[in-house]
Amino acid sequence: MRKKLLLLLTGLMVIFVLAACGSKSKEDVVEELNGKLDDLSGYKVDAKMTLKMGTDSQVYNVEIWHKDPTFYRVNLKNAEKDQSQMILRNEEGVFVLTPALKKSFKFQSEWPTNSSQAYLYESLIKDILEDKEAKFTATKDHYVFETKTRYQNNSMLPTQEIKLNKSDLSPAVVKVMDPDRNALVTVEFSKVKFDATFDKSDFDMEKNMTRAELNMPVMADGKDNAFTVKYPTAEIAGTKLIEEKEVAIEDGKRVVLTYDGEKSFTLVQEKVTVKEASSSPTYVDGDLVDLGFTIGAVSDGSITWTQDGVNYMIASKDLNQEELVEIARSVQGDVEK
């Protein structure tokens, strides 16, 4: 019996030693990721992105195509609302396509290199490489990094947990967290294909717009101008709603919310009117910002975005870009005034 026990213990020790020899250090994994970044020629990825806003959550299916070095096609679709947006980057610039509105927008933007992007593999690698203090753990199937983010509104979403598959270092799950470590953005990757090949037209703006329009129901033409007014839930110290005004316009109504205090701002909302499609994109004065639920444009003093057929604009002389983004992200629920 004693001999069998000794043999069993010896066998377990051998297993532990082999396991220890097979495990990789943080430095080993970082070095491999660096090599992966250098060799990355392109990929196709499918993912599910869940955004938590208060007590509600919204789920988006995300299809990501990347061709090295600078071509991108990110299709975000809210399956529940049957709405989609596409971010496209090619040799002509950065575009956001909104097929339901028959509109395309062109940005003068450094996207995606100017910020963290939870669904872009090379962005996640850069976040790991740049954060020398990143925490590292290993599980049976995954390497897990906790890093700082590079978002414009970094104080709202300061950290992220990046889980990579041990087999090929492909992304598995990313959780972007608030200061209280609540996951506000979760991206679950279901399919990752490295060394993907592409057709010449895959990143063409007009061809992508045509394809997207064929697959999307067109929104109402503007005859029904009813919409629910939304209020920001982000708290800005010393600022409160002092006026809500409804203004009649040619195509319906515009609602103007005025907030006064130390950080005053105005929030304008109006229903979108779908007009004839234009072959030329609308040039946007501002930088592309991913609000999670939609794509917006932020500049010094204002931020604009469209959601569920409603145009939104926040204008302020007191708020910086980070604060504008924080408030815009919070205009989600129908809350008490």
Image: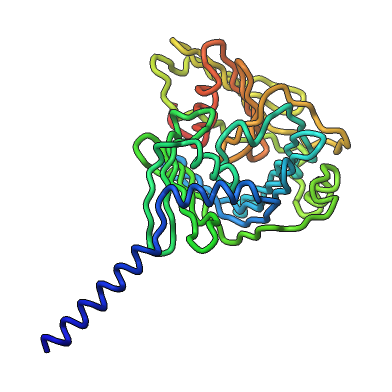
For the point 68% across and 26% down, the residue is 253
Residue at far right of view: 279
Instruction: Using the rendered image of the protein, determine whether residue 262 is visible from the camera's viewpoint.
Output: yes
Q: Is residue 13 above or below residue 156?
A: below
User: Which image quadrant: the C terminus?
Assistant: top left
Is 319 rendered above or below residue 104? Answer: above
Q: Kindly identify the residue that appears in the image at 73 percent across and 40 percent down.
A: 70
User: In the figure, residue 15 lies in which quadrant?
Assistant: bottom left
Compared across the picture, whether 178 is left or right of 93 comes to left
Q: Position of residue 112 (x, y in %)?
A: 64, 36
| The N terminus: image quadrant | bottom left
> What x and y, as percent, mark residue 289?
61, 32
Along the line of sight, the residue nearer the viewer: 59 or 164: 164
Nearer to us in this view, 21 or 102: 21
Left or right side of 35 for 208: right
- Indicate the position of residue 330 as horizontal and vertical percent values: 49, 32
Q: How is the image coloured?
A: rainbow
User: Left of 213 or right of it: where is 87?
Assistant: left
Instruction: Count how many numbered circles sit on residues in the image.
Output: 0
Q: Is residue 226 visible?
A: no
Report the residue that reaches farthest toward the left. 2
Closer to us: 22 or 113: 22
- Where is residue 194 shown, x and y percent of the image? 66, 58
User: Which picture quadrant has residue 255?
Assistant: top right
For image coordinates 72% across by 42% down, the residue present is 69
